[in-house]
Amino acid sequence: MTVGAALDGVATPAVGPETKLELSPAVQMQFMRPAQLEKAIREFPVAYVPFGLIEWHGRHLPLGNDALKAHAILVKAAEKFGGVVYPPVYFHDGFARRSLVPVLTDLFERLKKTGFRVILGVSGHNVQGQIDMVNEALAPVLADKTVAGMGLWEITLSRGAESNTDHAAKWETSNMMFFYPELVDLSALGDGPLAPNMKPPDGIGGQDPRKHASVEVGRRNVELAAHAIGKKAAELLEGLPGGRGSSSQRVIAPGHWWMI
């Protein structure tokens, strides 16, 4: 299957099972040079922080599925709306929150001091505890109301008939087929019936990916999710005092700034 349909009048590059969709390094913080980061903050001071974990996702998907999914969707959001995507964070709410939350608060504070005015913590691991963890860590950073932010799942703002999630079934498999087709091996599932409701030995929750997953389903899900997240970032930014034009970002250089 190839994909070449248009969304909102914009053509989408063809993507087939042997084609890996390119994720622009220009919006990923780890690939940016100082001047590029400065420019991005001046134009749209939004930091997207993807969260996930290492977890069983069937025999056919990578263990890092959740963070890979969230990160890639955020890159697509940043490509369209602006902003910068932080590298994936693989810590999750299964770790001791009393230890982890202060570390994440420190991360968010560092992003704030760098000049970001909106911080979105987006989890591909769709459990409430992950969002609670992100929001708890964000709370002291947002307290002075000079920045805005929130924790959300990748489909919180786009959930519907064409945008949803599951566990290693139709939706998550489709996402990986769209972003990382070389990491998906449906043949590993065999051709027999799958165990229902996350039961061993398959551990898959949702519709059988062999029957229902496709590149096209993933493409549409990603487009809707990325658009909704980018739109929310813009709304939060415009709602702050001074709108998007009052970032406190300073020059990214020794003497002012060294690391996040």
Image: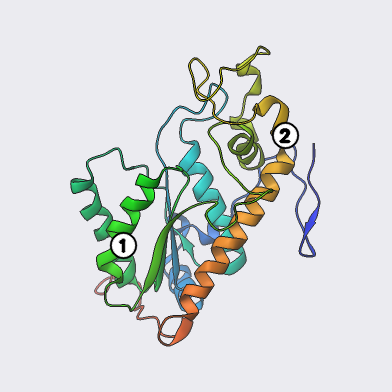
According to the image, label 1 marks what residue? 138
Q: Nearer the viewer, mark 2 or mark 1?
A: 1
Q: Amino acid at mark 2?
A: Pro
Q: Is residue 260 visible?
A: no
According to the image, label 2 marks what residue? 17
Q: Residue at x 65, y 26 (%)?
A: 208
Q: Amino acid at mark 1?
A: Leu
Q: Position of residue 100 (x, y in %)?
A: 24, 48
Residue 218, quarter of the rendered image:
top right
Q: Is residue 168 left or right of residue 174?
A: left
Q: CA distance from mark 2 to mark 1?
A: 39 Å
Q: Residue at x 21, y 55 (%)?
A: 102
Q: Position of residue 22 (x, y in %)?
A: 63, 49
Circle nearer the N terminus (2, 1): 2
Colour setup of the view: rainbow
Q: Position of residue 91 (x, y in %)?
A: 33, 43
Circle 2 — which element?
Answer: loop
